[in-house]
Image: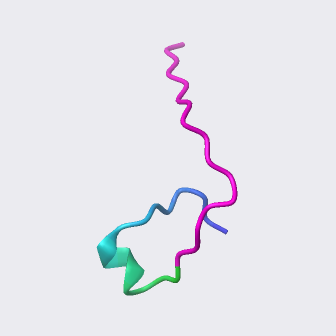
Amino acid sequence: MVPTVTYSPEREDEMAFTQPFFSTPYVVVSRH
């Protein structure tokens, strides 16, 4: 599994996308 592959119409021709079983709207931005 490649979790960084996101859906796009171009990729739909090459890959079979399913509905996500886990989704989170949160983003963490950090500067160290």
19 in magenta:
yes
**Closer to us: 18 or 31:** 18
How is colour applied across the structure in the image?
rainbow
Work out whether 16 lies above or below 29: below
Q: From this viewpoint, which residue is outermost toward the left? A: 10
**Closer to us: 14 or 21:** 21
Q: Is residue 24 left or right of residue 7?
A: right
Work out whether 28 lies above or below 2: above
Residue at (50, 63) in percent of width and height: 5
Residue at (40, 80) in percent of width and height: 12
Q: Give the range drawn in magenta.
A: 17-32
What secondary structure is the magenta-colored segment mainly? loop
Quarter occupied by residue 1? bottom right
Quadrant for the C terminus in the image: top right
Quarter occupied by residue 7? bottom left
Residue at (42, 86) in percent of width and height: 14
